[in-house]
Amino acid sequence: MSLAVLVLVALASIAIGAKELSLEQVWHGLFKDSGSYGDVVVGERLSRTVLGLLVGAALGLAGAVLQALTRNPLADPGLLGINAGASAAVVTAITFFGVTSLNGYVWFAFAGAAAVGALVHFLGGSRGATPVRLALAGTAISAALYGYLQAVMIMDEAALGKMRFWTVGSLASATTSTVWQVLPFLVAGTVLALGLARPLNAMAMGDDTARALGAHLGRTRALSMAAATVLCGAATAACGPIVFVGLMVPHVVRSFTGPDLRWILPYATVLSPVLLLGADVVGRVVARPAELQVGIVTAVLGGPVFIFLVRRRRTAQL
Amino acid sequence: MKAPRNQGARAGQAEQVEQAARAEQAQRLPAAPAGGFRGRTLRTGGLSVRVDVRASAVVVLLLVAALAASVVLIGTGDFPIPAADVVRTLLGGGDAGQEFIVNELRLPRVLVGLLVGASLGLGGALFQAISRNPLGSPDVLGLGQGATAGALVVIVLFSGTARQVTAGALAGGLVTGLAIYRLAWKRGVHGYRLVLVGIGVSAIVTAVNGYLITKADLVDATRAVVWMTGSLNGRDWEQVWPLLVLCAVLVPLVLSHGRALRTLEMGDDVAYALGVRVERTRLVLMVAAVLLTAAATAAAGPVAFVALTAPQLARRLTRSPGPNLVPAMCMGAALLVVADLASQRAFGADQLPVGVLTGVVGGGYLLWLLVTERKAGRI
């Protein structure tokens, strides 16, 4: 069922765009590529769609893992500043080290994501971290990094052109090579995260119970953090910081699967791309002939969800 | 810790509650004085006023610092003027060239800086007092973003004049503020819920701003981006007047509610029992704080983190609990002018907007604040 929805959205993402194409042209471009204008458009959209699928899955999965790890319903890679860390590291790499290829700066993205992840963990307090503390730590880090980004962009005019796209997440610059470059990292992160469902389930019952059930707390925490870092870092390196995807989807999924992570994680993997691609399609349609970056659309969609979660009783007991 | 001595105060029931609450607050504050409050009571006939000597000294010092920095700032630029000449020109005694440069070009810029800093400092102090949280500042809540959105709507959709942009920023800030208040209200405003709702709203509004920028044509977009960097470059008298009028109205209004705010900091129930109309006071003060922040944003663009840091620094200098409204105001003015001076001296005239400098420094300060708050076990 979820897979069917995903396929539909993926098709929509290929068919709908700033340039209007008939379904026939889309079909032609997909299966009988002859190098015509329409075929090229379809090719571009195809790589964009595939990237959206991968990045969406990565963000949703990272969000689900982070929410389980921190036992915090408001955890989201964007909100915790992990994506901002990755993008600040990438901007540093581009400006000060002259790194230009995705293969080069993806490592900087990992380093940035990992550093911020550790910092948030430290600031929020590893034990008994309240949702407020984590959210505030994330906001503070994002704000400081944003100031840094702004300073870099203003001091270095040439950098501004290259980096505008880093401040808002976008799928627009996707190419086939981008997809191939991030694919191994995303696959590795996804496998790692899916494998963590069982120990994370145990940890949901509290540290003591989890230990009694035979889970390795330290190892699970470290592996979860590593999975989230790889997923967020690679996703950000590919398309810039995108907020709220990792926040929304796990909550939607939890509402029909219940609290078992063995169901939540796969469903989040499948449904997050639906959200991301859907948002991307919306962004292409509403501002025709220009496009709206997908990061903007997800923020507009996700903000109300976040406020709803904050207002809801269970979360509001802070 | 000894209970604070409040010399010359009558020991009524209310005072006892107040003292107990203050003592509790003083215990939690790292910078609280060990021996209570150094109040000095002045009496003339039937009237008596308690003066906090340290706070007054801090206010005077900050004012002197702000004015000194302003004079140096007026003298700084492509055409340097010695400080003595600046003062003489301001008092009406300079030659024609200096008079033009000082009064027409640089004075408005410095005045905007002083006023923006003061309004941001006061607005921040109000918000932090209302949310009972040092992190509940307009920067974190996204009010600056809201005002930015209002201004952008005017710039991008209507290509409005400077005055209309000001009005737009005020409206945007007000709408955002009310939305946050409305969304955070649920049988009273809980401090942390306010902050979290603010974070959510600010994410949405930031996205809307991004949308507006992409939608704009090139001329409008350039104008919007220049405005959005939070800079004092090229401000003239047109920006000074609306801000000055607003400050003249709002500052006395806010200060007259200072006592109620002080009571409000002890918690809604205590304040209610002491006869403060909790929701009304809070609404009035929040609207005032929103307007102050929005007006400052309209004049100089979103200058980050002055509203967050000024009240905190002021509080550490005066070492007295409570909102510290006047010290925060003076601290904001001094901070902004000094930051502008620093960015001009370090990077050359008009190179780095002051908002970037305050953003980086303030962001770092925010992180430090989080660490210390955590150590104190308050969040």
Image (cartoon, coloured by chain):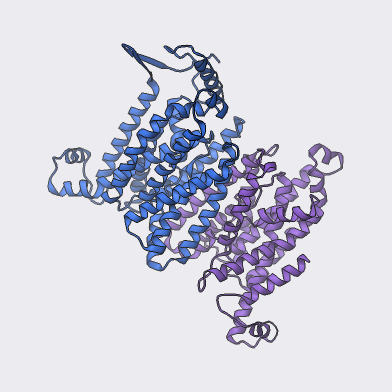
Q: Is residue A33 left or right of residue B1?
A: right
Residue at the far right: name it. Answer: A213
Q: Can residue B171 be seen in the rendering of this structure?
A: yes
Relative height, residue A294 to residue B130 (above, below): below
How many discs appear? 0
- Locate residue A300, reporting x and y percent: 57, 58
Residue under the image location 74 percent in, 50 percent down: A224
Relative height, residue A40 to residue A81 (above, below): below
Q: Can residue A241 be seen in the rendering of this structure?
A: no
Question: Splitting the image into 4 quarters, where does residue B194 fall?
Answer: top right
> Which one is nearer the viewer's eye here, B5 or B248?
B248
Relative height, residue B273 to residue A214 (above, below): above
Residue under the image location 47 percent in, 13 percent down: B5
Quarter of the image where the C terminus of chain B is located: top right
Rendered shade, chain A: purple
Question: Splitting the image into 4 quarters, where does residue B87 fall?
Answer: top left
Q: Is residue B103 left or right of residue A175?
A: left
- Locate residue B37, reporting x and y percent: 45, 18
- Locate residue A141, reporting x and y percent: 56, 46
> Which one is nearer the viewer's eye here, A72 or B167?
B167
Quarter of the image where the N terminus of chain B is located: top right
Q: Any idea which chain is the blue one in this picture?
A: B
> Which one is nearer the viewer's eye here, A255 or A36?
A255
- Locate residue A210, reporting x and y percent: 82, 41
Residue under the image location 41 percent in, 63 percent down: B157
